[in-house]
Image (cartoon, coloured by chain):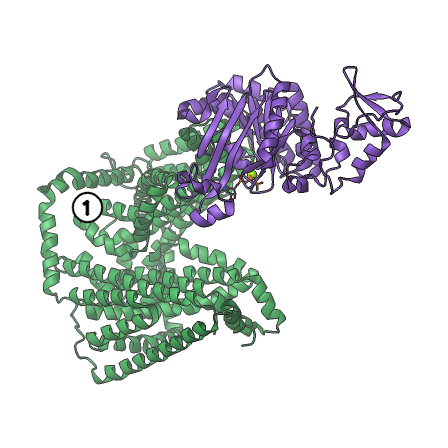
Chain colours: A purple, B green
Amino acid sequence: MAVPSLTEKSTPPAAAAGADDPPILDVRGLWKVFGPRADRVVGTPLAQLSRAELKHRTGCVAAVRDVSFSVRRGEVFVVMGLSGSGKSTLVRCLTRLVEPTAGEVRLDGEDVLACGERRLRELRRHRFGMVFQHFGLLPHRRVLDNVAYGLEIRGTKKDGRYERAREVLELVGLAGFEGSYPDQLSGGMQQRVGLARALAVDPEVLFFDEPFSALDPLIRREMQNEVIRLHREVGKTMIFITHDLSEALKLGDRILIMRDGALVQMGTPDQVVGAPADDYVRDFVSDVPRSDVLTLSWVMRDARPGEPLDGPELAPDTVIRDAARTVLSAGRPVKVVSGGALLGVVTTAEILEVIAGPDPGNPDSPGGESR
Amino acid sequence: MTAVPTTPATATAGAAAPGSAGGRRRLRGRYLAVLILAAWVLLSVVLKGRDTLALGGAELTPLHTRLNEGMDAIDAGRNSNPLFLYFINYIRLFLDESVTFVQALISQPSFGRPVPVVGWLGVTGVATAVALLYGNRKVAALTAAGFAAFGLLGLWEESMDTLALTLTAVVLSLAVGIPLGIWAGLSDRVNRVVTPVLDVMQTMPTFVYLAPLTLFFLIGPASATVATMVYATPPVIRITAHGIREIPVNTLEASTSLGSTPAQALRKVRLPLAKRTIIVGANQTIMAALSMATIAALIDAPGLGKTVLKALQTLDVGTAFNAGLAIVIMAIVLDRVTSAAGRRVEAERRAGRARGPRARRIEVGLVLAAAAVLVYLSHVYVWAAKFPGEARLGSYVKQGAGAASEWVQDTLVTYTDALKNLVTYGLLNPFQSLLAGSPWWLVALVVVALALLLAGRRAAIIAGVSLVLLVLLGLWHDSMVTLATTLVATLIVMVLGVVAGVWMGRSGRVDQVLRPVLDAGQTMPAFVYLVPILGLFGATRFTAIIAAVAFAAPVSIKLVAEAVRGVSPTAVEAATAGGSSTWQLISKVQLPMARAGITLAASQGLIYVLSMVVIGGLVGAGALGYDVVAGFSQYPLRGKGLAAGLAIVVLGIMLDRIMRAAAQRAAARPASQ
Ligand SMILES: Nc1ncnc2c1ncn2[C@@H]1O[C@H](COP(=O)(O)OP(=O)(O)OP(=O)(O)O)[C@@H](O)[C@H]1O
Ligand SMILES: [Mg+2]
């Protein structure tokens, strides 16, 4: 059971980074079981069974199994996993589009699962926003009315909601398409409408369920940049589901990896790539160019006695690829320095080691310490 | 024989032994069935005419008398029984008043005037305006022409009576059906309760409930409206529920995630998205209502149906044709306008209105103003109120159709007679003498045995009970005569269905040509078929059979075509690659693999044929159909008519159950032979 220990280890420093803030979303022991008598699974020996076995024995599917995590304010938190691993179910449990079977979900300390219908609607109307894989636009409404929909159902007057909808459409780059109908737009543009609809109500937390997987690669890249830009501009907390690792690495401040409904690993992109918790994750990240993700802190070593220490200085969170040119051209060890203190050195050997790929013998050689 | 027998072998690979045992048992069953049939034929010759339980047209059994008395009792209670006083009579009053009110508006002299409130010009104007605003210019022109045709045919008043009855029933049907459909769409529980009720409402032959209805709602518009509603409401309920149900979950979820209440989700998401489907349902309801409103002439509903009915009774083909033409025109107009409205809703849903809201408002204003002017004119001036001219076109049509019918009957008599005789002597008479001419116990025994062999024990029990019921109803002989006609008609329907259906299923071009014809055939009110057929063949059992075939064939053909098209293309490709000829392909691959669909086509065809039994009674089919019709018109026979209606239902249930069970058996074993 290496997994929980790793998550436990990695959580405290992460929390320490934004130490003054309590998490905006706190999830504890969340379960979702589909099927007959789903409520009779959690808390019994059945809960220990694997997903396949449980399905065989009871006909129930444990879509989410005992998942805990917390999301900091302003963070982009990515949930990743193969198809069927329970990502969509997890994110739907958070807003109770799917009713969780057990566990706890707290938004700013408020117990979301204990909310009544009315309070839940309040939360959905004002604090949550969601973007869907298949957009879920209303084909009988113009773009403007689609974007204004969230405001409309919470009772905003026509002028107010149209003004806001125009603002948001501008923000997502769709100014001029207010009068179009969804069917007249391309997939990428439709998803921008979906995004605008979620943003229009000015939510605190945005959920994205594989929003770009129905789009072709070029548009997808464009939309990812769009999300990064938006995150920078509006600074919302985002919970982003994807099964695309490069998307996860590109967007995520932290990544949660799921398999068969359970949490396998949670950590920053470089933790996931640098120290995969098990073979599943290792397999997952094996195609990623590690030099694009790992930072110097993952490869630096202590200076050996007698080594020249007059080389250039780099910060420990420099991505290896960006450091490569400096290291290669330096011709001597490059110092990794933070706050004036020498943390270690990097030489051509370490850089090449990363580019050559992980040594199957000792995959997690580049130290357990995080930045 | 090369490709196909491998199918069961591969399908049941590893289970060869039980498979072949089943095959042997099946073969034995088949021999037995043939044996039973042979024995029946033999015995029927020996025992001919014994125990046939024949009952003359005016003869009654004690049961019929008792039914008569029961109906009398209900009649007597009309003004004293609380159920009537506080419930049924109010409904009747409401329905009568509703229909009378619409009639006063458009068809009957009213409010002390010699003409209705709105004359022909006004009605045509309003109808055209509606077609223009909800449909398009083309259907508006069609509407104007159609309404003008009613006047030209000399049937303005009758047409408006039919329209009044149809509209009232449609409005009420939609008022009941759409909310119910929405409810059934939202709630699985409601859906589960509603579905079987709708099944019964739709499969029960319409004439069967006409007579009992008159018992409660009296003869006239109220009964006609209720009957029409019973027939016309199920489609809109079903289709609305389907439309509400099939809304993509994505869209609903998105709405919920934004915090919409269930009511908001219904109003802003489900209903707008289901609008098009609901209009399709309304279209079906309208067509069904028109069909039933004409048939309701049997219980004295006013309108075109009555004209047709009277003409049929006097064998006046010309007049019947003229009125039938008006019905067809009305059906076409109603169908086209509602279809166009549905398409328009869809187009607007996808891309917004063609014109801005301002332009639309002006358009609406102008059209309504024009219609209002026409209404005013038709209210004030006689020329705009009463259709001018003495319906010259109508009399030409009558004469022409009458003459054509005579000419056809005279010149084609050799061919029509040959066909008639072929079917009558070749099929119908042998069938009839076998079924109606053998002792009842022999027939019952044979039917139960066959049901047991081909369809299993349950079906055999149902068959046994049904047959006993037929005896108890006192209508065994008539039932058997009707059964013979029904079986012959179904046989013809299936031959047509398979031939045309396979043709359609195999060729896209044929499909394109035939489908509109079949669609048109299905939207036509059932009455209309009778007229030309009557013109060709006169009033005989054969005419009734052809009418039933014309009514039932489109459904069966479509179902067979669907099934043939549904055969997996890979199987067809594989057989073609194996060198099968077209004929081999059809007989060894496509037909066997489409067996389930073909059985469905047969059972649907049967139900449609049965629902024409009463209409057949109008044109000489005799037997149960005649009993029902006589029950409508002759007081002493109404108990017998009721029993005959029940007998039709019993026949229907029996045949349906046997066919379904047999089909299930057929589907359970792999497609082979
Ligand atoms: N409504 C439901 N009823 C029963 N089982 C469900 C339901 N929804 C999801 N599941 C099951 O739960 C599991 C997780 O499904 P989920 O949709 O959350 O996966 P996912 O990770 O989002 O996959 P994908 O990447 O394909 O979207 C699957 O095995 C699925 O079959
Ligand atoms: Mg998913």
- Labels in figure, total: 1
In the depicted view, which residue is nearer to us: A272 or A141?
A272
Q: In this view, does B185 lie to the left or right of B581?
A: left
Q: Looking at the picture, how far across and down is residue B640, in whole percent?
A: 16, 61
Q: In this view, does B224 lie above or below A242?
A: below
**Badge 1 residue CB within 8 Å of ligand 1:** no
Q: Looking at the picture, how far across and down is residue B202, in whole percent?
A: 32, 52
In the depicted view, which residue is nearer to us: A240 or B358?
A240
Q: Is residue B287 left or right of residue A195?
A: left
Q: Is residue B268 left or right of residue B652?
A: right
Q: Looking at the picture, how far across and down is residue B350, in whole percent?
A: 55, 37
Circle 1 SS class = helix
Chain on which label 1 sits? B
Q: Residue at x 51, y 60 (%)?
A: B566
- Can residue B370 be seen here? The reply is no
Residue ID for mark 1: B217
* Residue type pointed to by label 1: Phe
Question: Quadrant location of residue A351?
Answer: top right
Residue at the front extreme of this rendering: A305
Question: Quadrant location of residue A361?
Answer: top right
Ligand 2 placement by image quarter: top right
- Can residue B236 be seen here? The reply is yes
Disc 1 crowd rating (10 Å Cα; few below 14, some 14-19, many 20+) is: many
Q: In this view, does B263 lie above or below B310?
A: above
Q: Is residue A220 above or below residue B394?
A: above
In the depicted view, which residue is nearer to us: B426 or B42?
B42
Q: In this view, does B168 lie to the left or right of A300?
A: left
Q: Looking at the picture, how far across and down is residue A19, in whole percent?
A: 61, 16
Question: Quadrant location of residue B665?
Answer: bottom left
